[in-house]
Image (cartoon, rainbow, N blue to C red):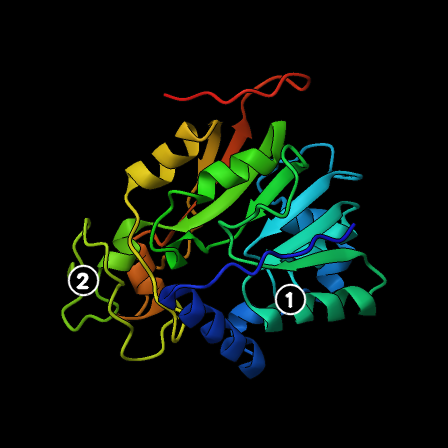
Amino acid sequence: MEFEPTHQPLDDSRRNNQQAWDRMARAGHKLTAPATKSELANSLKVIDGLGWLPGGIRSWKVLCLAAGGGRHGPLYASAGAEVTVVDLSPVMLERDRQVAAEHGLQVNTIQTSMDQLDMLPSAMFDLVVQPVSSCYLPTLDALFPEVARVTKPQGIYISQHKQPANLQASLDTYTGHYAIEHAYYDRRPVPPAVTPNLLREPGTQEFVHSWNDLLGGICRSGFVIEDVSEPSYGKSDALPGSFGHRCYFIAPYLRIKARRLGSATTPRLITF
């Protein structure tokens, strides 16, 4: 099934991030690496290390949201799902099509912003998967309501987000301590990293979103949060200023499993 993107005009931040991810993909940045043959052969284990999808996802309709690059889409398709990938970067989506063709997989692709899904029918997906990406939106006002709209009642939404402190704090340290450099309620883009860093994607504009906007936004849109996980990358003996050292002091990410409220036969939106 193919869906025609609406091509809504992009604001400056979305256009900037689209171009940044295009450059990263062309340059072979680590975060744009496609799934390997070995990972595709063990796809369910790779995508569900936490056991949030017991019984597998064969024949499920899955939306991989802001997830181009040839990794998520092919992995979920390899696990037996009917996959649609949404991404703002045409270069990242081309990677999905290349990997799918190479491995004989079917992946539909749509170029659009993660919060502009009006080309998709309501209550379509059993599962929406969103890797770290909400930080690229200036506001989350439309994101979670749109995810809720396209998710079936009792469907699952698995998303990962940069924790606010991760974007607020300095990347480097010369004393073993990190400083808060960006205010929690400052809605302007976070100042770009001066030197390359695994915690900040080069050339992107990122925004701090409060827990009220992240967790509250998911719940107010019609989901109930069932579980959370903080991926652990911290190392107590790592060199100050390194990725492992900073992650030991500041947890970088939060992964969330949420379920769409409503019965399977009578969709309904719950507000709090």
Between residue 87 and residue 241, name the one nearer to us: 87
Q: How many marks?
A: 2
The residue indicated by pointer 1 is 93
* Kind of residue at disc 2: Tyr
User: Which label's residue is closer to the chain start, 1 or 2?
Assistant: 1
Which residue has dot 2 on it? 178
The numbered mark at residue 201 is none
Quadrant occupied by the C terminus: top left
Q: Is residue 71 above or below residue 64?
A: below
Q: Residue at x 48, y 49 (%)?
A: 115
- The amino acid marked with disc number 1 is Leu
**Where residue 182 appears, x then y in whole percent?**
18, 59
Q: Does 216 sit above or below residue 254?
A: above
Q: Secondary structure at mark 2?
A: loop
Which residue is the extreme one toward the bottom?
27
Q: How far is the residue under mark 1 from the one under mark 2?
A: 36 Å
- In the image, 26: left or right of 183? right
Q: Is residue 49 left or right of residue 197?
A: right
Q: Residues within 10 Å of mark 2 (few under 14, many from 20)?
A: some
Residue 106 lies, in percent from the top left, at 80, 56
Mark whose residue sits in front, 1 or 2:
1
Determine whether, in the image, residue 62 is placed left or right of residue 165: right
Q: Secondary structure at mark 1?
A: helix
Tell me which residue sits at (65%, 61%) in the image: 71
In this orientation, which residue lies closer to the viewer: 169 or 189? Answer: 189
Where in the figure is residue 249, as x and y percent of width and height? Answer: 26, 55
